[in-house]
Image: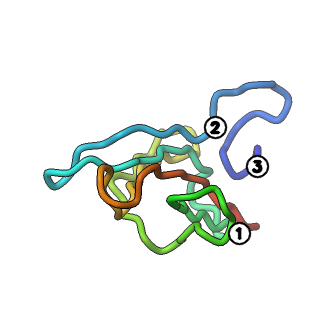
Amino acid sequence: MEYALHSDPRMAGSGRTPATEVLADLGNSYVAMTYTRVGGAADLAFTPEFSSSLDAAGFTPSLFATISVADNGDGSETVTVRDSVPLGGTEGARFTRLRTCL
């Protein structure tokens, strides 16, 4: 994970963990996730996942929208994605996780 999130493995708590927030988009509120990744790494796959439960089977990797990808100038990128399900509907709570595959 240290490599994938472009953080320093020699430094505890380097501040590169994904963060969540509520984002207004298209007239609705959505759960959004922002994470930093190593830029241009062809050997990594990042899959943001959202769910209405913490059950592993409930997370859906394909239902999100990319809001922004910003080059940080240090070999990393900051990515913000949002859930495709608006808050306040029949879904109730929404949960996020970031799946990273090498």
State the separation of the CA atoms marked 3 and 2: 9 Å
Quarter of the picture holding the C terminus: bottom right
Q: Amino acid at mark 1?
A: Asp
Among numbered discs 1 and 3, the one appearing first in the sequence = 3
Provide the secondary structure element on which disc 3 rests: loop
Q: Is residue 32 above or below residue 74?
A: below
What x and y, as percent, mark residue 49?
55, 62
The structure's colour scheme is rainbow
Pick the front one: 97 or 5: 97
Instruction: In the rendered structure, find residue 1 and report the number of the disc placed on it.
Output: 3
Picture coordinates of residue 15 (x, y %)?
64, 28
Q: Which residue is mark 2?
A: 17
The mark lying in front, picked from 1 and 2, is: 2
Give the number of the mark in front: 1 or 3. 3
**Residue at numbered disc 1:** 43
Residue 19 at what x, y percent from top left?
Answer: 53, 38
Is disc 3 surrounded by few (<14), some (14 to 19) or many (20+) residues within 10 Å?
few
